[in-house]
Amino acid sequence: MKKKTITDEMKSYYDQRAPWHDELMNYQGIDQMEKLFQPIIEKIEPIIVNQTVLEIACGTGNWTQVLTKRAKYVTAIDSSKQSLDIAKQKLQETKNLSFKLIDAYSIDTLTSRYDTVFAADFFSHIPKTKIDSFLLSLHKVMQPKSQIIFLDMSVKREFQQETVYIDSDENRVSKRELPDGTSYDVVKNFHSEYELLSIFSKFGNNISYTEIKSLKRWMITYQTK
C-alpha cells in the first residue's frame, strides 16, 4: 500500500473542510470580497484584464469570482471535488470559466496554454522539496513571457497560536482541527522576502515583491523566461 504523504493529508483536509470553508474564512459574498481586497485587486487587475488566466487551487471559488469579472477566460483548478462543487454553484451563470479537477502537482497534464497564472494562499502549502518541480511543471503550460501572480498570507496571530512541528524537510507543519473534531497535518510555510526572491529568480524575470500590510498578505509577480 502506498504511504500517505503530507500532500495527500492536505487534500483530505481541504476535502473535509469545504462545507465550512467560507464560514471559517468569513466570506460574505463577492461585494464584500471586492471591497475587502481592493488594495490587491487594483494591483492584479492590469495584469489579468482580457487575459486567459489559470487559477491554481481555486477552492470554493471566491477569488474565481474576482478573476472572471476581469479576465477574458479563466480555467480554475483544484484537487478537491467538494470545493469545486461549491465553486460551481456560486459561478453557475458565469460563461468565461471552466473548472477542472486537477492536482496542482499534475498541472502539466493541461493541454491549453495560458497568458497569466493566479494562485491565492497556495504557495505556503507547497512542501519545500516540491517547489522547484511544481514551478517547472507550471511553466510548461504558460505562453512565452507570460505573467505569474502568487498571493499568500503573512504570519498572523492565529498562526502563532497553532500547534506546530518542523518536519524532516524543514517544513512548518501545523495541526488543523475541523468543526467535526477531525485533525490534519497541514504544511504552512512562511517564507521571507529574501527566500521568495531567491526561489523565483531561478524561474522568471521582472520579479516584483509587494507587502500588503493592511491585509497581512504578500504578493509576488514575475514574467516567465
Image (cartoon, grey):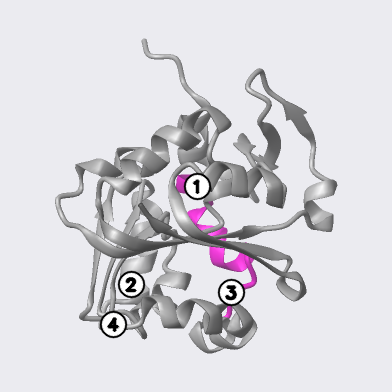
Q: State the mark number for residue 89.
A: 2
Q: Residue visible at 63% across and 66% down? A: 25
Mark closest to the chain's N terminus, 4 or 1: 1
Report if residue 38 lies within the magenta region: no
Chain part drawn in magenta:
14-28
Q: What is the CA distance from the residue labelled 3 to the residue labelled 2?
A: 15 Å
For residue 193, side relative to residue 75 (left or right): right
Q: Closer to the N terminus: mark 4 or mark 3?
A: 3
Q: Which of marks 2 and 4 is nearer the N terminus?
A: 4
Work out whether residue 141 or residue 182 is closer to the camera in this orientation and state it.
141
Q: Which residue has dot 3 on it?
A: 27
| 26 magenta-colored | yes
Q: Which of marks 1 and 2 is nearer the N terminus?
A: 1
* Residue at position x 35%, y 82% in the image: 49
Q: In which quarter of the image is the N terminus?
A: top left
User: In 3D space, how far apart are the residues under numbered discs 4 and 1 (Cα atoms)?
Assistant: 31 Å
Q: Which amino acid does label 4 sit on?
A: Asn
For the stretch drawn in magenta, the main secondary structure is helix
